Amino acid sequence: MTTNHPVADEQEEQVQIESQLRNGALLMALAGIAFIGYGVVFLVMNFVGDGFELGVSTLDGMTSAELDPTVAYYISHLHVATAAFIISTGIAITGLSWYGVRQRLTWAWTTAIVTAVVGLALALPMHWTGNAFSHDWVTHLGPIYLATIVFIVGVVLSYRGVHTA
């Protein structure tokens, strides 16, 4: 008498891997959408907010209206450029995750990770050096930290699916 337990177990494992791949890719893509949202908020705050970033209300007690107009415009210019790169990074991560990771494309999975890591590794440390200005880290960095946690969970979940044939 033969049993089909090994085949059934293998099929069950394959279903689990597919589910983890799908859920992981979804979480990675949702994190990318969160990055886009953060960039959009960053952009909107520049034009209709107080002129500074989310979680930053003054620079050494000065509002943007109290700054030299040239300096204020330069800060605005940098905010728009930064928002553009946050949004474009989010678009790249979302597309790579949703279309590439779900198809088990290792290069897409790796590129999404490298894209997120480079952006975060370059941007985040500056927030913890010096005391040139104060910021509310919960509103300023909390959304990015949350999106990063979601992204990491997605990366871990999708790992097996991407790396199995």
Image (cartoon, helix red, strand yellow):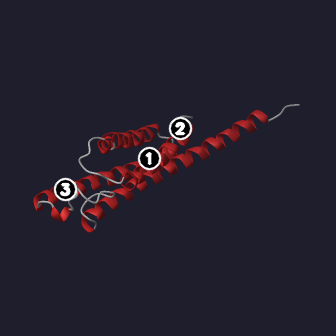
| Kind of residue at disc 3 | Ile
Q: Disc number at residue 75?
A: 3
1 vs 3, front mark: 3
Q: Position of residue 51 (x, y in %)?
A: 24, 62
Find the distance from the CA under tag 1 to the CA under tag 3.
26 Å
Type of amino acid under label 2:
Tyr
Residue at horizontal 56 percent and vertical 39 percent from the top? 161
Q: Residue at x 54, y 42 (%)?
A: 158
In front: label 2 or label 3: 3
- Most distant residue in the right direction: 1
The quadrant of the image that shows the N terminus is: top right
| Dot 1: element | helix
Q: Is residue 92 visible?
A: yes
Front-most of 140 and 97? 140
Q: Is residue 1 above or below residue 149?
A: above
Q: Quadrant of the C terminus?
A: top right
* Badge 2 density bin: few <14, some 14–19, many ≥20, Cα 10 Å: many
Residue tagged 2: 159
User: Which of the two marks, 1 or 2, is nearer to us in this view?
Assistant: 1
For the residues marked 2 and 3, what is the alpha-carbon distance in whole angstroms?
40 Å
Percent from the top left, x then y, of residue 12? 70, 41
Mark 1, residues whose alpha carbon is within 10 Å: few (<14), some, or many (≥20)? many
* Spot occupied by residue 79 in the image (x, y as percentages of width and height): 24, 56
**Badge 1 or badge 3: first in the primary sequence:** 3
Q: Secondary structure at mark 3?
A: helix
Badge count: 3
Q: CA distance from mark 1 to mark 2?
A: 16 Å
Place of residue 36 in the rendered image (x, y in percent of width and height, measured from the top left): 37, 56
Task: Name the residue rendered at 11%, 60% in the picture.
Answer: 68
The amino acid beneath tag 1 is Thr
Q: Which residue is mark 1?
A: 148
